Amino acid sequence: MAVGEASFPAMPVIEGLRLGTARAGIKQPSHRDLVVIEIPDGARVAGTFTRNAFCAAPVIVAKEHLAICSVRGQGPRYLVINTGNANAGTGEIGLRDARATCAELARLAGTHAEAVLPFSTGVIGEPLPMERLLAGLPAALQGLDDGPVGWHEAGEGILTTDTRPKGASVIVPLGDDSVTINGIAKGSGMIKPDMATMLAFVATDAAVEQSLLDALLRETVDRTFNCITVDSDTSTNDACMLIATGRGAEVASEEAVRGFRDGLQRVMTELAQAIIRDAEGATKFVTLQVEGAVSRREALDVAFTVAHSPLVKTALYASDANWGRILAAIGRAPVEAFDVSRVIIDLGEVRLVEAGGRAPGYTEEAGSAVMGREEICIRIDLGRGGQAATVWTSDLSHDYVSINADYRS
Amino acid sequence: MAVGEASFPAMPVIEGLRLGTARAGIKQPSHRDLVVIEIPDGARVAGTFTRNAFCAAPVIVAKEHLAICSVRGQGPRYLVINTGNANAGTGEIGLRDARATCAELARLAGTHAEAVLPFSTGVIGEPLPMERLLAGLPAALQGLDDGPVGWHEAGEGILTTDTRPKGASVIVPLGDDSVTINGIAKGSGMIKPDMATMLAFVATDAAVEQSLLDALLRETVDRTFNCITVDSDTSTNDACMLIATGRGAEVASEEAVRGFRDGLQRVMTELAQAIIRDAEGATKFVTLQVEGAVSRREALDVAFTVAHSPLVKTALYASDANWGRILAAIGRAPVEAFDVSRVIIDLGEVRLVEAGGRAPGYTEEAGSAVMGREEICIRIDLGRGGQAATVWTSDLSHDYVSINADYRS
């Protein structure tokens, strides 16, 4: 199940950046499950990774290799991504396998193993099927393509329980020039990113200083991928990579940074929202806007408490305007000296709650009309301050239980 | 659905304490939905209440009346409990209705309104049907009974989505004498108590000083009702009351306090576990033992993170020994400087994880054999210190979604 229609955009070429895929038989024989992204020489790469203490072997190796590239002053040249197996909870064997994958790709492509960053997604706790994975690498390299087909097939090659590939692209005008930002992402369950979501790859032809690139990625991830949740479960394999080839216009002036930041925010918001629209079992796409908070942290705490409440999520699934459950969830959020009589809750254009109780003009009919929609906005004003935050989430359906109870994922 | 068989014990008489019920038509016509508990003169009463900022009107009034009783030096004489309507999120009207209920019961019973404590449970956000509620009070008073029938019917009269009444009783020997502790509780969903669970009433004939009674209740609630979770949703109406009539043996010596504390712990553990066994949609009763923590808080944080993980809960429902999901949940718990290579996870008698990966001798067959059981113990050793905590929880089933999506509760 998924919310709304989704089409994969025809991605413009980012010169020098190519993507190739293979069917290595790691996931199912008919699926693309191996992706190689070739990065041109001179590009800069920023990355954010899961904060889960049990982070997967490829996350450890990718961070190590990125640090080595930084010391050497030469950016990474290849990303290699497999789906079907997360190489997580695999101890020493997992580290050895991730390093061996990088070494083999480096040998085939004529570069150093440390110039390759590995990423994996899929089932936790099984060793990587190394023979099949390594055997798939030549095909992925031979298929390297810089056009829309390369991007689309790579978008498909990183999926797990997702029902559709997720891509987004913008062209940002910079004075007389312009830069392109393309991105792909995957994720459908085990989604409550903390630093990044389960695999997103964004690339641009812009020329951006490394420290600025790092800062922009961190800032944008915090307002996009870190603001979505399906089920409160942070993955062991989360990673978001931002590649700037530097072959296009320079992003340095204040105005250029502003334009680039906006473009990046648009691409990453679209990818983050695409993950929620395709969340496991989702029938609703829900925007939680919390306003009037003392701090952004407080606004996020309230938004996530509501977004994680199984009772709110099942009411959303049932299209039941059960504002009592929303109110109960807000009430248990970690907010100091909370005066509940100032809270206002709007469901779409309908006022649900004010002064700690049902709003005077509220009718079940009006509430049900909004709850019946596929896209629902819940606005919560805490009446305490001037800070706000927005979080996107999905509902909790029978299909979520089926997907996670019937299959090993 | 519910886990295992459950029988309601034949409760011994606690002299002077009587319970009466009525079918007032608040829930469904055929259900007992109104309960009055009469407390003898001279008894001491301790209470803990929800910490949800949106606490219900009866919680506010019960706390006020308990404080007034304390100032006057006269304990409360009546508890009045209705199910079918929580009188929560009802603003000023809710407070007026809760006070009017106390006033009417006081008038009928010849006492002060402040000597009556009100409790409500059921749907949030609807006004109490006052006419029917008040009309039911005389029948509840006429039916007051101090025997097993009174306790059993009161146990039934406080239920909401529960499938069965929950009672526990122990007799604690104190030297040549003994005291009785009886308790009833309700709760099945919206269960993640914070100070107390959704309505538990425990009574004893013991003579216990007020400050000791307060301390024993707080301490025991923290290790029983505050250690269960169905769905992480803290109710707006949680309350746990402990009544000591003082007509039996005195609990004052160190030995007597120890014996009484153990008895209280047994009764309240049994009631807390009964709530989990009857959790909405539950097919599994799960004990999470976290050991080797730096602090009890840390052990509780890890235990609750695992207990709230929808992916762990659906794996439990599926009887799937998906240790990767347990490991991923532990990894996102708020633990400082977490060395995951020291973590050990046992599933019943089977070692699942050690050194950050699957235990060498582990087989899927052995794991599945344990996961197939109705009662499952997951032991997690963090290898960091000497503190521990135990939390009880249930699985996440199709029926949980049905119960909370198909019906307004």
Image (tube, coloured by chain):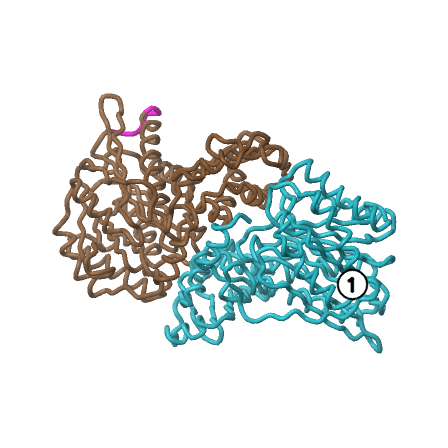
Chain colours: A brown, B cyan
- Where residue B386 appears, as percent x and y from the top left, is 59, 66
Position of residue B259 relative to residue B77, above or below, is: below
The residue where tag 1 is placed is B145
Q: Nearer the viewer, residue B31 or A50?
A: B31
Is residue A67 part of the magenta span, yes or no?
A: no
Q: Nearer the viewer, residue B90 or A52?
A: B90
The answer to whether residue A50 shows anywhere in this view is yes
Position of residue A371 relative to residue A71, above or below, is: above
Is residue A252 part of the magenta span, yes or no?
A: yes
- Where residue B73 appears, as percent x and y from the top left, is 87, 51
Position of residue B84 relative to residue B318, above or below, is: above
Chain where mark 1 sits: B
Categorize mark 1 by other alpha carbons within 10 Å: few (<14), some (14-19), many (20+). many
Q: Residue at x 46, y 44 (%)?
A: A316
Q: Is residue B100 left or right of residue A160?
A: right
- Where residue A128 appears, as percent x and y from the top left, is 28, 64
Amino acid on which disc 1 is placed: Asp
> From which residue to which does the magenta span run?
A250-255
Q: Main secondary structure of the magenta part?
A: loop
